[in-house]
Amino acid sequence: MTFNELIEMDFSFIFSTVFRFKLILSTLRNTMSANDKYSTPLSSRYASEEMSKIFSLRNRFSTWRKLWLNLAIAEKEVGLDMISDKAIEQMKAHLEITDEEIEAASKEEAIVRHDVMAHVHVFGKTCPDAAGIIHLGATSCFVTDNADLIFLRDAYDVLIPKLVNVINRLSEFALKYKDLPVLGWTHFQPAQLTTVGKRATLWIQELLWDLRNMERARNDLGLRGVKGTTGTQASFLSLFHGNHDQVEQLDERVVELLGFDHVYPVTGQTYSRKIDIDVLSPLASLGATAHKFATDIRLLANLKEVEEPFEKSQIGSSAMAYKRNPMRCERVCSLARHMGGLLNDAIQTASVQWFERTLDDSAIRRISLPSAFLTADILLSTMNNISSGLVVYPKVIERRINSELPFMATENIIMAMVEKGGSRQECHEEIRVLSHQASAVVKQEGGDNDLIQRVRATEYFKPIWNELDTLLDPSTFVGRAPQQTEKFINKDVANALKNYKHLVNDESVSLNV
């Protein structure tokens, strides 16, 4: 065997091996199930179907087709005669992309290395009469950026009703418990009494601010419109033979057809990525609200005063069967941290865009924008579930009040003694001594607070013995908490939700897990 024959045989063996290897890989790919691939838990485990659908491949590519259709309609209306009615009718008939077309576009993209052009080709094969005018005058960002803005608006339209219902359910809770005294905490140390309902208003007020911020972000969204490759509309000016008025009409008409009321007046190739900051900021802020709400419930669960819903068959711990872990609130805290961090993606991306555009925004936005809205969706669904089933334990609350109230009542006791003719300074010293004795029983002996028993047993305080029950009534220590709660719900919350009455419901919100 010659040297050349040997070389040819070796190369033949290599090529044969490579071919067999590729065949094996192809077979493996074809036999892989969905369980063999990573999928984000945001969509597979937690988020609602309606939010997941917004950022789905089918909705993305179908929206591209909708954009191409409306571009063609507007171009024809403004004066481009080469666009036929038949072409437009074909595009209308195939707006929703099929699974087969998605697969075909994926194969096409592997060849041309351009997702938009792959879909232009596939759409053109589906609509042969429109093949020559699809994407006419446009750059890729006409579909990608405008579609993103549509998704952001639609996603807010899913979130806002859910936020409205969280606010409404917590408002009902606040009114129900507006008069129930509870120990307040500062520095997580016992403080002056408040009420269970008044504490809930603190959560609600922050949620109202979140609603305001989300409304602003949603309503401020415009479209990129038709701006061309560097934002100058040069391609469209050429299409309309230098007629500036027609180009402006085209820009306005496309936006109108897509249901937006304004277009960004100037862009580079992309809409300013600063808009993404404006869009994600309210979500990050909501995350802070959600984290605070859920943390408060977690702390209250430890105190056994208030708990999140706990289902009859729910298991709290795999080992400790008695446990009722606040797992829903813990999930809220976990995902809220994730959502807050996504805002930095938008900030950093906006800050590093070069001139009219750079592509280093693409990959990160494909991840960050859907993730932020999917996470917000999960947070609000979970908060709706929690707020509709909060469990309050009045007897535990009462017991904790009774353990601390005697110390808080010392000022009332002093004032009552002074009204009976006693000396403020003398009374202060008497009550100080008794307080320290009672404190020692609590801290050193582990006993109950017996300050009031000591007051009843001390002759000095005999003039007010009959008034002690009144002086120790918890409802007299909550100030205007009930009145504040009632006014806040009936005025501030009512005003904020007056335009959303049709969205309020009492439907139970079940969670997948």
Image (cartoon, rainbow, N blue to C red):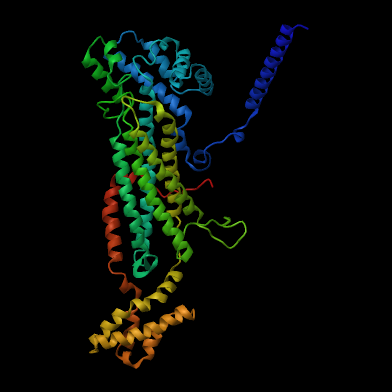
Tell me which residue sits at (38%, 58%) in the image: 173
Q: Quadrant of the N terminus?
A: top right
Tell me which residue sits at (54%, 60%) in the image: 324
Tell me which residue sits at (47%, 31%) in the image: 56
Q: Is residue 321 above or below residue 400?
A: above
Q: Which quadrant of the view contains residue 236?
A: top left
Q: What number of labels is visible? A: 0
Residue projecting furthest to the front: 3
Q: Is residue 511 above or below residue 86?
A: below
Q: Percent position (x, y) of residue 399?
A: 44, 74
Say whether residue 79 is visible.
no
Say whether residue 345 is visible.
yes
Residue projecting furthest to the right: 1
Q: Percent position (x, y) of residue 244?
A: 22, 15
Q: Percent position (x, y) of residue 220?
A: 28, 36
Q: Which quadrant of the view contains residue 428?
A: bottom left
Q: Percent position (x, y) of residue 295?
A: 43, 57
**Side of 353 where 36 appears, left or right:** right
Q: Nearer the viewer, residue 114 or 422?
A: 114
**Side of 1 where 58 appears, left or right:** left
Q: Nearer the viewer, residue 23 or 181?
A: 23
Q: Is residue 435 above or below residue 334?
A: below
